[in-house]
Amino acid sequence: MSKHAGAVSQLVEQLGRLPGIGRKSAERLAFHILRVPEPEAIALADAIKRVRNDVRYCAICFNLSENESCAICNDPNRDATRLCIVEQPRDLMSLEQSGVFKGHYHVLLGRIAPLDGIGPDQLTVDALVDRVRTSNFAEVIMATNPTVEGDGTSLYISNLLSEFPVEITRLARGITAGSVLEYANREMIADALTGRQKL
Ligand SMILES: [Zn+2]
């Protein structure tokens, strides 16, 4: 039996489900939420509700968006000849924060991971191929993570896209093998982008 009152133990349990949050941290967070001014705690709950109600995937690039298509896809000042392929929306955010890339993105929403039973059909690969077929991209930049699965995904996609007249490049290995875009700093990402190589 839990040592906390019902509502508190429920909150601790929910917080404890978050990645990287153990039982002790969950308890700390729960008591923090009880201590802060009420509007602050309610704002947190509202932000969680809002993100679940209002945020969806962009119909074009599968970035997170509050509209049918995202701000990047709708920006006429972005370079429509370059397409950067990433695994997750958070990778896109890391690349955006580097400020180097001004083209468009395509988010795969994962990577091919045979051991986890994830094949290309569970990703946004079909939409990507359609997009490349019907757009005028000159360059497709593979920015999957430099892991075994990320590299495998990149290879699979570059084979699929080889029938189109686009140059396929990948990020330079400024990002150490095994590390992920999410944790790379801005300079590393900028270097990887400017030093990208033909695949
Ligand atoms: Zn988009």
Image: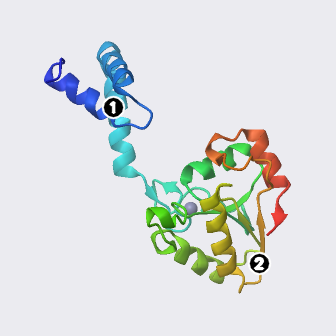
Q: Within 8 Å: ligand 1 and the Cβ of disc 2?
A: no
Q: Determine which residue is flagged by label 1.
A: 15
Element under disc 2: loop
Point out the image quarter for the N terminus.
top left
Is disc 2 surrounded by few (<14), some (14 to 19) or many (20+) residues within 10 Å?
A: some
Residue drawn at the location 55% of the way across and 55% of the way down: 88
Element under disc 1: helix
The residue most toward the bottom is: 163
Residue 146 can be seen in this image = yes
Of the image marks 1 and 2, the number of the one nearer the N terminus: 1
Q: Determine which residue is flagged by label 2.
A: 166
Q: Is residue 162 left or right of residue 115?
A: right
Image: 101 above or below 153: above
Judge by depth and name the residue closer to the eye, 49 or 128.
128
Judge by depth and name the residue closer to the eye, 179 or 45.
179
Q: Which of the two discs, 1 and 2, sits closer to the camera?
A: 1
Q: Amino acid at mark 1?
A: Leu
Residue 68 can be seen in this image = no
Q: Quadrant of ligand 1?
A: bottom right
Residue drawn at the location 52% of the way across and 73% of the way down: 120
Instruction: Give the image quarter of residue 48.
Output: top left
The residue most toward the top is: 35
